[in-house]
Amino acid sequence: MSSDSRNLAAAIVQSLVDRKAEDILILEISEVSLIADYFVLCTCRSNPHINSVNEALDQKAEELATTWHRKEGSAEAGWILHDFSSVIVHLFLPTQREYYSLERLWRDARPTPVEAFLTQDSDQT
């Protein structure tokens, strides 16, 4: 797992915290899957909230001069996925987070405390 992936995940997590996303969970999946290094999951309270968080991720990608490889879903569907290649971000409304239950599906992945990403030196991002 590269430090670039970790730095990207840290920047994403900070954006989620800044936009008041809830129940943020970071799963290190690199040891159980080849698709990415991290999954970042969060819950948004409403359609406007999920749209706000979605826009923040787009802005963060622009600031970091990176782009997502794929983006799926919508606020109306209750979920949005941003695939940044090494970091995949899942935005959910509460009912969709419970329905998809990615925490259970990826239970072999290693959860990492949000605080471990927020204490990173901001010069690295």
Image: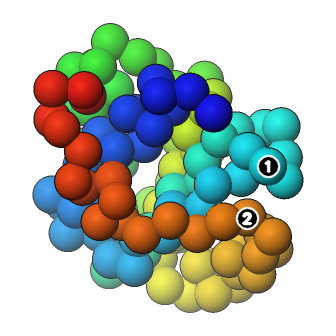
Q: Secondary structure at mark 2?
A: loop
* 55 relative position to 30: left or right: left
Residue 73 shows in this picture: no
Residue type at the position of mark 2: Ala
| Extreme residue toward the top, this view | 65
The residue that appears at 22% across and 21% down in the rendered structure is: 63
Residue type at the position of mark 1: Glu
Residue 25 shows in this picture: yes
The residue that appears at 34% across and 26% down in the rendered structure is: 61
- Quadrant for the N terminus in the image: top right
Quick check: 52 above or below 41?
A: above
Question: For residue 40, which numbered disc appears in the image?
Answer: none
- Quadrant for the C terminus in the image: top left
**Coloring scheme used:** rainbow
* Residue topped by disc 1: 31
**Residue placed most toward the observer, 124 or 43:** 124
**Residue placed most toward the observer, 55 or 21:** 21
Quick check: 105 above or below 122?
A: below
Q: Secondary structure at mark 1?
A: loop
**Residue placed most toward the observer, 51 or 33:** 33
Contact? badges 2 and 1 (CB < 8 Å): yes
Q: CA distance from mark 2 to mark 1?
A: 7 Å
- Mark nearer the N terminus (2 vs 1): 1
Percent x, y of residue 74:
51, 54
* 118 relative position to 111: left or right: left
Crowd rating for badge 1 (residues with CA inside 10 Å; few <14, some 14–19, many 20+):
few
* Residue topped by disc 2: 109
Percent x, y of residue 102:
71, 72
